[in-house]
Image (cartoon, rainbow, N blue to C red):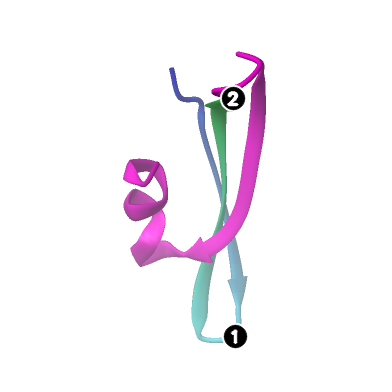
Amino acid sequence: MAKKTVATLQTGSKKLTKVIKMVKSPKTGAYFFEEKVVSADNVNDFFTKK
């Protein structure tokens, strides 16, 4: 179960995107959110990586 939120940020010539992914903890079973600012080209890599 993954929640996908994408907000586009532009700084100079680079196009950056803030991505948020909901991840389930293997120890407790609780969900937490992982946030990161990545380039627009690497958004799919962020969501496919475990």
User: Residue 17 appears in which quarter of the rendering?
Assistant: bottom right
Q: Nearer the viewer, mark 1 or mark 2?
A: 2
Front residue (pair 29, 37)? 29
Question: Is residue 42 rendered to the left or right of residue 33?
Answer: left
Magenta stretch, residue numbers: 26-50
Give the answer, above or below, for where 23 lies relative to 44: above
Q: Position of residue 22 (x, y in %)?
A: 56, 28
What's the residue at 40%, 54% (across, down)?
Answer: 43
The type of residue carrying mark 2 is: Ser
**Mark 2 crowd level (few <14, some 14–19, many ≥20, 10 Å Cα):** few
Residue occupied by mark 1: 12
Front residue (pair 32, 8)? 32
Q: Which mark is residue 25?
A: 2
What's the residue at 37%, 62% (across, down)?
Answer: 42
Q: Position of residue 5 (x, y in %)?
A: 54, 36
The type of residue carrying mark 1 is: Gly
**Mark 1 crowd level (few <14, some 14–19, many ≥20, 10 Å Cα):** few
What's the residue at 59%, 85% (across, down)?
Answer: 12
Residue at disc 2, secondary structure: loop
Task: Give me the C-alpha separation between circle 1 and circle 2.
Answer: 37 Å
Name the image quarter holding the N terminus: top left
Q: Residue furthest front?
A: 27
Question: Is residue 9 rendered to the left or right of residue 1?
Answer: right
Q: Answer whether residue 2 is magenta in the image.
A: no
